[in-house]
Image (tube, rainbow, N blue to C red):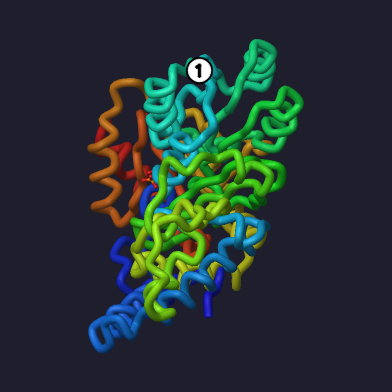
Amino acid sequence: MAELGSRQLFPHLKVASYLSHAGVSPLSAPVLEAVQAHLLDFAGEGVGAVPEVLAMRLRLRQKLAQLLACNPQDLALTGGTSWGVLAVAQNFSWRRGDRIACVQGEFPTNVTPWQAAAAQHGLELIFLREDLADLEEQLRHGLRLVALSAVAFQTGLRQPWEQVVELSHRYECQVFVDAIQAVGVVPFVVGELDYVAGGAHKWLMGAEGCGYLYVRPDRQADLHRHWAGWLSHQQAVDFLFQGPGHLRYDRPLRADPQGLEIGSSANLCQAALEASLNLLLELGVNRIFAHVSDVLDQLEPALGFLGWPSLRRPEAASGMLSFRPPVGTDLSAWERALHQRGVQISTPDGYIRLAPHWPNSLEEVPLVVEAFREVQRSFE
Ligand SMILES: Cc1ncc(COP(=O)(O)O)c(C=O)c1O
């Protein structure tokens, strides 16, 4: 049974306070057990393990759909966030001269595939500042697609994706959201969004190597199938199970996102993700967000002595608390020194980022504060 603020399901976790869930999450005992059970199935049965894999993938799709508030058939199981971005960037029905907008400061996952598509198809890629007025100005000049993150990876600021989609659709511009830094900790539903991609290893607390892509039903037919593999066809596996005469290469390609799944996939990572989703769904994201917010509400003022501005804003709160230390601060040295004192943080792009999740307890706060105090003193 998962319990907010309890590490009981993380018996292998070494540091006293793990605050790097926005980087890579530690794996819980149920995740390890699920992966081991899968490995044993393959060890014992080889191909005999496949039916359970197919059943697991079905359950995983349903659980992801429950989390994202969408239909399971509108999801593709992917190899991670980049896979999802690339699937849309490579299959979008681009017209030469189309304009795409990315956001300045974005994690490169949500930039590089758009740059590649721009080079391939003669598109113009522009960078937005983080404000809606700038977006509207660009929409007036014509945008085909805007790509943003639900939560910015370094500042931890929740982005106003609902307003972005509302505004963009008024100008017939589609919206792609990289949701890896939100889903699992910040309440998130796909709503009107056109495309949503994410990966397993951060706030979903699964292992690296798998993720999801949501495609809004009325956008699915518009996506080309430049990416097509043997599982992209309708009735793709009939030739394996239905006897002779079913091996054909002319079956139509599936129009739904599952048609983008192309071939066999990382089922061990998918089994891990299913097990971690069981815990997240049991706890509920609203309760997790409230719990994580309580931890951050205590940490933020208690770390005020550092004298570093906090980036956290109530209207843009996420699972992260980020500070911007003065230029010249040796962030790697801070990270190492905190780690020696049992606190794992991360330091993306000049920020110090604290990212607790549901197993973190309020009782860790004094320990974290003391570690920061000691490290600050040691560097004076
Ligand atoms: C906003 C954001 N998107 C994507 C990723 C990772 O993408 P992928 O799942 O393709 O490795 C990260 C961090 O690693 C991130 O912070």
Of residues 84 and 281, the one drawn nearer to the viewer in this rendering = 84
Whether residue 51 is visible here, answered yes or no, is yes
Of residues 263 and 238, the one drawn nearer to the viewer in this rendering = 238
Instruction: Return the residue at label 1.
Output: 96
Residue 345's spot in the image, x, y percent? Answer: 36, 47
Residue 276's spot in the image, x, y percent? Answer: 47, 68
Q: Quadrant of residue 306?
A: top left
Q: For the residue marked with disc 1, what is the amino acid? A: Arg
Residue 90's spot in the image, x, y percent? Answer: 43, 36
Task: Say whether mark 1 is within 8 Å of ligand 1.
Answer: no
Residue 281's spot in the image, x, y percent? Answer: 59, 68
251 is higher (above) or lower (below) than 117: below
Q: Residue at x 42, y 39 (%)?
A: 86
Looking at the image, which residue sits at the far front? 245
Q: Secondary structure at mark 1?
A: loop
Residue 14 placement, left or right of 175: left
Q: Residue at x 51, y 57 (%)?
A: 258
